Image (cartoon, helix red, strand yellow):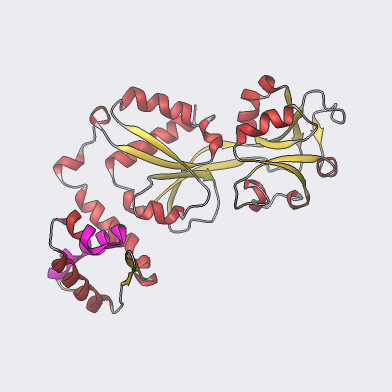
Amino acid sequence: MKHSDYSLIPTFVAIVEERNYSKAAKRLGISQSAVSQGVTRLRDIFKDNLFIRGSHGVEPTPYALDIYPALANSVESIAHMLPEQRYFEPAKCQRQFTIAALSVFSFTLFPQLAKRLFEQAPLASIKTEPLFGQDMAGLLRSHQCDLLIEAESNRYPHLRSQRIMQDRLVVVCRAQHPRFSSSQLNLEQYLREQHVIHSQPDQKTGYLGDMGISGLAERNIAWQASGIMDMLPLIGQSDCIGILPENLAKQHCANFGLKPLDADFLPKEILVSMYWHPSRTNDPAHLWLREQCVLSGKQ
């Protein structure tokens, strides 16, 4: 690549993120013909089509998606060296941040995050999105979403991550359950009961179904709830049992007449991380948001 070709990198990044030549041109402040000419040159440089036209714009090729993170990161890094980007003042920030997360964090992590946001950045706002049914890596890559927060896994190898909190899982039942007078529960007892789970329309096993916890596939599922808080009254008014994060159970069991049971077959801890696209790593506002998430997770 010649030095003169480096100016085409922002064009490449804009097309990947906008999926449309005219939108990319508008974002860059250049003509659509200049974008098209840039694509022709980029194809010659990388020996790949890079973009394939579709009914609603263009789609990046697999190779374009492979090289996008490094190129986007370089564009972002250069932008953040400019004087106006170098210093971030939370009190003046009017940005809306979007976070995709499980509903449980609305009761554990987000209240503390909201408190910090309202105090430090009163002009900013946060929008939360459901975790399920979306291409999260794609939304993070296109900057439609800022952060993904969920239990640690190997599902996002191309994203950056940082651990922000930990929890553990407990089984909960109604306080006067006829078969659980002690606080201990083994797998055999667990599987004899009917279960309430937290799931989404495209799931049959619930959110915990792919976490490798022994025996979950054999459960007799009596009720699939769309939200984790919806599980509590259902368990409180029946002999069904369910699995909840311990921090949530501590906050709300008494309010719904429930009690926690210590299950030896559940993981000793659940680690929670935030994930983001590498291109956002040096963004001062994004860095500030991540710092607030870390601090909120410690409280």
Location of residue 127 (image quadrant): top left
Residue at 68 percent across and 50 percent down: it is 205
Residue 74 versus residue 232 in the image, above or below: below
Most extreme residue toward the right is 179
Residue at 51 percent across and 32 percent down: it is 106
State the residue in front, 82 or 228.
228
Q: Residue 179 location, x and y as percent?
A: 87, 31
> Please, what is the dominant secondary structure of the magenta stretch?
helix
Residue at 20 percent across and 75 percent down: it is 40
Is residue 238 a member of the stretch shown in magenta?
no
Q: Residue 275 location, x and y as percent?
A: 44, 48
> What stretch of residues is rendered in magenta?
4-24
Is residue 19 a member of the stretch shown in magenta?
yes
Q: Residue 31 location, x and y as percent?
A: 13, 62
Location of residue 66 (image quadrant): bottom left
Direction from residue 255 to residue 173 in the image, left or right: right
Q: Residue 128 location, x and y as percent?
A: 44, 38
State the residue in front, 33 or 8.
33
Quarter of the image for the N terminus: give it. bottom left
Direction from residue 298 to residue 34 in the image, left or right: left
Most extreme residue toward the front is 55
State the residue in front, 226 or 185.
226
Direction from residue 213 to residue 47 in the image, left or right: left
